[in-house]
Amino acid sequence: MSNSLSNFLFFFFRSALVSLLITSKAAKLETAPKSSGKPKPITLSGFEDLAVGALAGATSRLFTTPLSNVVVRKQTSSKAAAPSEKGKEKEKPAGAQDDDSEEEGEYSVDEPGIIDSLREIIQEKGVLGLWAGFETAALLSITPALTFYFTHAYMRIFIPRRFQDKPLPAQTFLTSALGNATATLAIFPLILAKSRLQSGKRGYKSLPDVIRSVLRRQGPFGLYAGLETQLIKGFVSQGTTMLVKQRVERWIVLLYRRALLEQSLR
């Protein structure tokens, strides 16, 4: 739900910002002296595309960070299950130090509801605690911007020009998935830091605190723990999202044209 809402808000804000920017550029071209020849289509530069995507991503995160924090709290607040007889036999000897790893123990199926998670977060950190990790989330807003940037780059590289305006479903899926995988690989340490900040298990205070702790305990490779799962998840999720988005956009355009046609025939 959190990811779906975040994707919807990102596309909504990005479309609005792109429209505003293109309208502004068109207005400037109208006042500029006209040159002979066919006018070039108005497009965004690479920097403008990244900036618009980052701003749209940050705005969408402003609305979805509380929900994301609740989801993470629900996933990480399960009560520890009572140790069984076999579990007692495997208990550590007295005086043994706890391993400072991220391994999880056994958990019961009980987990707090949404309201309980909200209350728990507010009691621990106050109302602003609902936006804990927003700074990192804002930094991560560059993810969809980079995804779009790399996706467009892969389209120019791998897709023939005759298909670039209307790519085939398989082309849309593969270029979008590869774009997301490349963006994820570039900023995965921030993704890892955000998840651990939101979980609240170790009481991390800030992004640098997470980075220092992981480097101290696990070394540089620790910053990429779980990368394979994230890549697979993003590969399938982004490819499917853009494929569905392409289909929905075409249906909306067809319905709009049909409505205009029916109105004109009346």
Image (cartoon, rainbow, N blue to C red):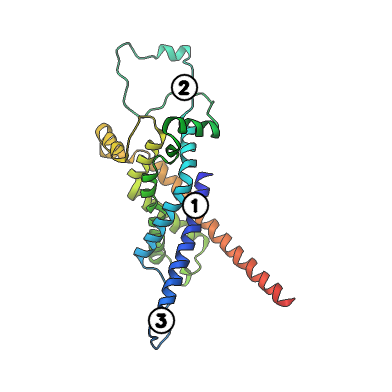
Q: How far apart are labels 3 and 2 at the CA level?
A: 68 Å
Determine whether 198 is above or below 80 in the image: below
Residue 194 pos. (x, y %): 38, 41
Residue ID at (37%, 60%):
51
Instruction: Return the mark for residue 7.
Output: 1
Residue 151 pos. (x, y %): 41, 60
Amino acid carrying mark 3 in the image: Thr
Q: Do callouts 1 and 3 mark residues in contact (Cβ within 8 Å)?
A: no
Viewer-proximal residue among 171 and 207: 207
The residue tagged 3 is 31
- For mark 1, give the secondary structure: helix
Residue ID at (43%, 45%):
232
Residue ID at (41%, 73%):
25
- Total number of numbered discs in the rendering: 3
Task: Classify 10 Å Cα crowding around label 1: few (below 14), some (14-19), many (20 and above).
Answer: some
Residue 118 pos. (x, y %): 50, 34
Residue 100 location, quadrant: top left
The residue tagged 2 is 80
Residue 36 location, quadrant: bottom left
Viewer-proximal residue among 128 and 41: 128
